[in-house]
């Protein structure tokens, strides 16, 4: 259940806002877990694309529908440009999302070559009419209103799982995850593949928590809503288990693509909702 670059992570049709409640009931509870993904460069095109890249993602997910969902995420990527010195980007984020998708808090800190680059700190709250109020502390103090159609990251995943379980193959949506300037909403298109229960080939994916759990290959394209672009800003593909765990990541930024292999998975003890 991950987003990179912002990694994670709104689906729309107004009725899906109400379906957020039923999504919890239709799918098994999301698994509290720690996961590590090793990143490698699998495609590079053009003069501005890196000649080599390595990295790692560390991802913690805890919580439940009754307690809310908390995530801690760190992504470190070392890029080797075709000319000039290497660049190391270190992004850390922490979020908390209310189980009923009524609020979302987020902080994102990014360093490039050990120098602070971007820092984001904000919160969203959903009113009784569904309209979302945004209050941003960093990078600058600001307030804004978002459409009721916008979904939060875990809410987004729950809707993807509900759609997959219902046999749907595509899902259009709006999503907010706090990335970039802390105010941006992305239009998304999710394509859902055929369900499989074949055991994953990597050792980390062969734990008991994933045994006999169905998963679907999904591809999510993120479009910059402000630019109205026809080409996605980036595309992320992964296998999504019914309990929210992800494997076989693939993040396509256009000029280059990173693959993320699940190398470690640890289940975190979590009290079930009553």
Image (spheres, rainbow, N blue to C red):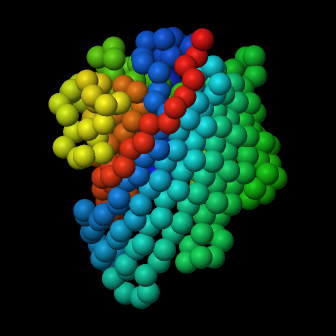
Residue drawn at 59 percent across, 76 percent down: 114
The residue lying at 28 percent from left, 41 percent from top is: 205
Q: Which quarter of the figure has residue 101?
A: top right
Residue 155 in sight in this render: yes
Above/below status of 248 relative to 108: above
Image location of residue 152, percent across then percent down: 58, 33
Indicate the position of residue 232 as horizontal and vertical percent values: 40, 49
Q: Residue furthest bottom?
A: 84
**The C terminus sits in image quarter:** top right
Closer to the camera in the image, 32 or 14 = 32
Report the residue at 56% width, 35% height from top.
62
Nearer-the-camera pick, 55 or 86: 55
Report if residue 250 is visible in the image. no
Q: Measured along the vertical axis of the image, is residue 206 above or below residue 126?
A: below
Count how many numbered circles sit on residues in the image: 0
On screen, residue 72 above or below 63: below
175 vs 252, left or right, is right
Pinpoint residue 69: horizontal percent, then vertical percent.
60, 32
Q: Nearer the viewer, residue 116 or 210?
A: 210
What residue lies at 64% left-to-right and 33% top-to-bottom?
97
| 250 relative to 96, above or below | below
Where does residue 103 sit, x and y in percent of width and height?
Answer: 70, 30
Quadrant occupied by the N terminus: top left
Residue 45 picture quarter: bottom left
């Amino acid at each position: 259940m991950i987003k990179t670059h912002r990694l994670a992570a709104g689906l729309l049709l107004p009725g899906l806002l109400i379906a957020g409640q039923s999504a919890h009931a239709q799918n098994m509870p999301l698994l509290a877990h720690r996961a590590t993904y090793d990143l490698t460069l699998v495609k590079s095109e053009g003069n501005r694309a890196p000649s080599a890249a390595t990295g790692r993602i560390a991802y913690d997910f805890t919580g439940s529908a009754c307690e809310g969902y908390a995530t801690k995420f760190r992504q470190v990527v070392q890029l080797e440009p075709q000319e000039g010195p290497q660049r190391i980007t270190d992004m850390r984020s922490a979020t908390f999302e209310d189980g009923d998708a009524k609020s979302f808090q987020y902080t994102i800190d990014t360093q490039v070559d050990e120098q602070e680059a971007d820092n984001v700190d904000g919160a969203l709250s959903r009113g009784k009419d569904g309209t979302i109020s945004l209050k941003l502390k960093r990078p600058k103090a600001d307030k804004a209103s978002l459409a009721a159609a916008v979904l939060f990251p875990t809410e987004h995943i729950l809707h993807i799982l509900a759609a997959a379980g219902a046999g749907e193959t595509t899902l259009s949506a709006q999503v907010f995850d706090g990335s970039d300037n802390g105010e941006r909403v992305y239009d998304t298109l999710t394509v859902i593949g055929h369900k499989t229960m074949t055991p994953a080939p990597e050792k980390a994916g062969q734990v008991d928590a994933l045994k006999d759990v169905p998963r679907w290959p999904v591809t999510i394209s993120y479009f910059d809503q402000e630019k109205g672009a026809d080409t996605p800003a980036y595309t992320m593909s992964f296998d999504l288990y019914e309990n929210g765990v992800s494997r076989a990541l693939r993040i396509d930024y256009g000029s280059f693509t990173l693959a993320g292999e699940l190398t470690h998975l640890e289940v975190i003890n979590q009290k079930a909702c009553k």
